[in-house]
Image (cartoon, rainbow, N blue to C red):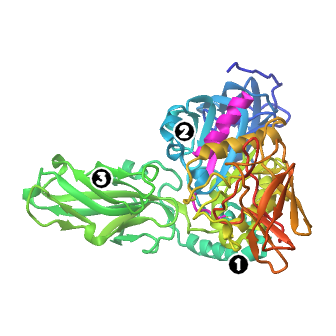
Amino acid sequence: MKKMIVSFAVMSLAAGNLCAEDMAQEFTVQSVFSSHMVLQRERPISISGTAAAGKAVHVEFAGQKVAAMADSSGKWAAVFPAMAAGGPYTLTVTGGKGSTPIKLEDVLVGEVWVCSGQSNMEWPLNKSLNAEQEVAAAAHPTLRLFQVPRTPSDLPMENLRGARWAVCSPESAAKFSAVSYFFGRELNSKLGVPVGLINTSWGGSSAERWMTASALAAIPEMVRPLEGFQTRAAAARATWHPGINQDSVENVGLQHGWAGFQTPADGDWRDMELPATWQQRGQDVSGVFWFRKEVDVPAEWANRPLKLAIGATDKEDITYFNGEKVGSVCEADNRLSYSFKRVYDVPGNLVKAGRNVIAVRVRSDFFDGGMTGPADFMQISCPSLNVPAKPLAGIWRYAMESNYGFCHPGMPTELFNGMIQPLLPLAIRGVIWYQGESNTTNSELYKRLLPALIADWRSSWNQGDFPFHIVQLANWEQPAPFQAGSKIATLREAQSLALRVPNTAMTVTIDLGEVDCHFKNKQAVGQRLAASALAKDYGMKDVPCQGPVFKAAKFEGSRAVVNFDNPSGGLVATGGDPLQGFVLAGADGVFHPAKASIDGETVVLEAPEVPVPKSARYAWADNPICNLHIQAGFPAAPFRTDN
């Protein structure tokens, strides 16, 4: 891309010059800023980080220089005027004399979107429809990807562990959100500007986990769960061991010799009986723990290959024998890593007669963590000899490398604190949101949660009413023409009611699902989201983006006439007539299948069993049999008139 340069005068924070000696300090930039990132165009650009209180840093970007001073808490922010799309640029942060500059290379200015929700947003490209071809074709130099690691936290976090921006390539896109990728690819192509995608999603997560405490406190049903979480978190925090390396994902224990043959001198080493989660043994935190056990090896085992079975480790492990790595399992490569039983080969050259040391580094950043067995599986054996294996269950020595904080599944606020709060320094264009499956047990509450979440995020980012695009839940479970009490259908209705919030839009997917809620056609979801954004946020009014949406129903004698918003391009029944998915009920509230016919921009309904209809529904089931679309292919949204 041709570089676009915009020149501005040098800005300063206060009158007078800042001398070099005053600026000599340690300083950082927040983790959401890295090489290869995209910054939001046409909005002020804020770059932030930390430094010693009262000290200054200089930030240089695209021919502009801004001086920033750290406040009393050590935080600084340098704000640049809004820019047009362009790049690549280098962003340089410098301190004073003797300091090492921080250089962020290959920085672009374009469109930035946050992509959040649960498993259907998290679902990776390499598991989508036509995955092999899609991954192979995922080379887009001006599309950039930022994967937020799963990070629950009881307190708001400033930074993310190990997160970095990446250029979109087959390697970086393969495990990235498929919906996000297809959405961003379409914007990148149609707009002709750089696009940055931030995937911050978690399978099975409920909406309340993505909201701030202040937003939840305003919802009566959430006050007690919120207070319970805060009380438990405070109690756990009072007994925390800090660890030697609070937040890093670096293998600090290895640097301290914890994997080695020698007895480690540092670290607070204690006894723990295994198998167990460390929560079961009184350590109510997430983080990185090391476990060590000495094994007395018979002389006849020396220099022979061994089998080391340590059982499941929840979630990730790196396992060592006498200081040498013999195996590991990473959650990113094995979604069932928490229950996968590890068996590693120990080379004969590592095996000594007498004292040998097994060391296991276990990392868990959510829910439980530890070496969970089962006990009878944990053993070390010598396959080349017909001798009994040595059991490994029992007392191990342990020490904490990193403490990530209190974490229990499903707690309110924990994902906002750990996976949204660190993103707030970055200006964005908007949000795409695919979530709701985990809230189907209480759709009435979701009618308040979703609008509150939208307002909460907009308030937290402090960028006005930015676009918020909602993916309505797809069809799943067994196909059915009608289910009066469908919890999934009522959740879809709750999602549609959020459209009363300004600058929101909904992408309907009622025709894309399968019996399993994790359908593979994420291409259509991303493309529909992109069409909605192009039409509503980027002014491309000629781009079809939405199917028919219920407007009103008129009941006339034995007929019901249904009117729709957005019937542009003509109503059609996909797959040919007849229309399916409509039901009618009279005063008794009992619904019967309706004969439906298209009449211009309306649908006319009749049912012999309902001589005087009073209410109508469409696509009202978990997995409804329905086929009303517009000519452009977008499906009609489910609705009911009796709510």
Q: Pick whichever, 62 or 52, lies toward us.
A: 62
Q: For marks 2 and 3, give the one nearer the viewer.
A: 2
Judge left or right: residue 68 versus residue 199: right
The residue that label 3 is drawn on is: 320
Badge 2 or badge 1: first in the primary sequence: 2
- Which residue is labeled 2 in the image? 173
Q: What stretch is highlighted in magenta?
A: 177-206
Return the residue found at the far front: 608
Amino acid tagged 3: Tyr
Please name the residue shown 83% across and 25% down the image. 9
- Mark 2 nearby-residue class (10 Å; few <14, some 14–19, many ≥20): many
Looking at the rendering, in which quadrant would you find the C terminus? bottom right
Within 10 Å of disc 3 (Cα), the crowding (few <14, some 14-19, many 20+) is many
- Give the image quarter of residue 344: bottom left
Q: Distance between the residues labelled 1 and 3?
A: 45 Å
Question: Of callouts 2 and 3, which one flags the residue occurring earlier in the amino acid sequence?
Answer: 2
Is 182 drawn above or below residue 414 in the view shown? above
Sequence-wise first label, 1 or 3: 1
Dot 1 amino acid type: Arg
Query: Label 1 crowding class (10 Å Cα cut-off): few <14, some 14-19, many 20+?
Result: few
Disc 2 is placed on an element classified as helix
The magenta stretch spans residue 535: no
Q: Which amino acid does label 2 sit on?
A: Ala
User: Label 2 vs label 3: CA separation?
Assistant: 31 Å
